[in-house]
Amino acid sequence: MPSLPLRLSALFLALGLSACDDAPRFTKAEPGEARSGGATTVRKTDQNAFSLPSANLPPSRRVDFSVGNSFFRSPWVIAPSTTTARDGLGPLFNTNACQNCHIKDGRGHPPTPDSANAVSMLVRLSIPDSPAYATVIEQLGIVPEPVYGGQFQDMAVPGVTPEGKVRVEYTPVPIRFKDGTEVELRKPVLQFSQLGYGPMHPDTRFSARVAPPMIGLGLLEAIPEEAILANAA
């Protein structure tokens, strides 16, 4: 199957294909960067820093954090199983645990050329809309690809054929900042292979998603809905 270009955001296009300001400097911390989370900021800086509870979380709430974190790390299994709280995996899936995508509660990454699967990056699928799909668009917001649905799944339980494999290749895009600094960006190109259920719709649209870091989500959840609505005006 031929290469399928990854749709780039307007921000990337503006940065990579037009003139840029001076090159960014990282010689010192920006104001407020040292404690970006205020009193919740964790000072640990090793590979597990994103996996820790907020620094000011009281002991009574740390048990809740530990329980939630265990669900985040533990894998799901095929049903039926003695582990009734974690069964129901498959038949098709992208990975069997949250932690596999949000690596150590941090950001994921695209698959390398030699990766067995694309864990921590998934690809959304859709086809162009039309009046015939009005009901589907109202329900889902998109028109899923007719064979593979709205999300490409490259893993499966034993006895089931995965939907295929997806990889990312890169085309170099050189740019120059106004101060003369030259850097090279990379334009991603999606490659699909070993499609398990036939070819895709010829007009399929693709949107690659790398798993975001989990830090800060609890702070957003702690904001009362009425406060958000009050500020919306």
Image: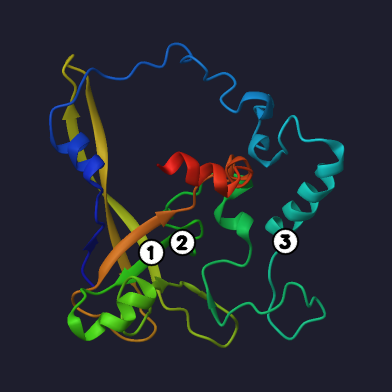
Residue holding disc 3: 74
- Residue 123's tag is 1
Quadrant of res 192: bottom left
The one of 94 and 113 positioned closer to us in this rendering: 94
Quadrant of res 96: bottom right
Quadrant in which the C terminus appears: top left
Q: Amino acid at mark 3?
A: Ser
Q: Amino acid at mark 1?
A: Val
Task: Determine whether label 2 and label 1 are within 8 Å by CB.
Answer: yes
Badge 3 element: loop
Residue holding disc 2: 118
The one of 172 and 78 positioned closer to us in this rendering: 78
* Residue beneath the point at 23% across and 17% down: 22
Query: Tag 3 or tag 1, which sits nearer the N-term?
Result: 3
* Residue beneath the point at 29% across and 60% down: 190
Query: Tag 1 or tag 2, which sits nearer the N-term?
Result: 2
* Residue beneath the point at 84% across and 47% down: 63
Whether residue 144 appears in this view of the structure is no
Query: Tag 3 or tag 2, which sits nearer the N-term?
Result: 3
Picture coordinates of residue 76, whole percent (x, y) = 68, 70
Quadrant of res 38: top right
Q: How many marks?
A: 3
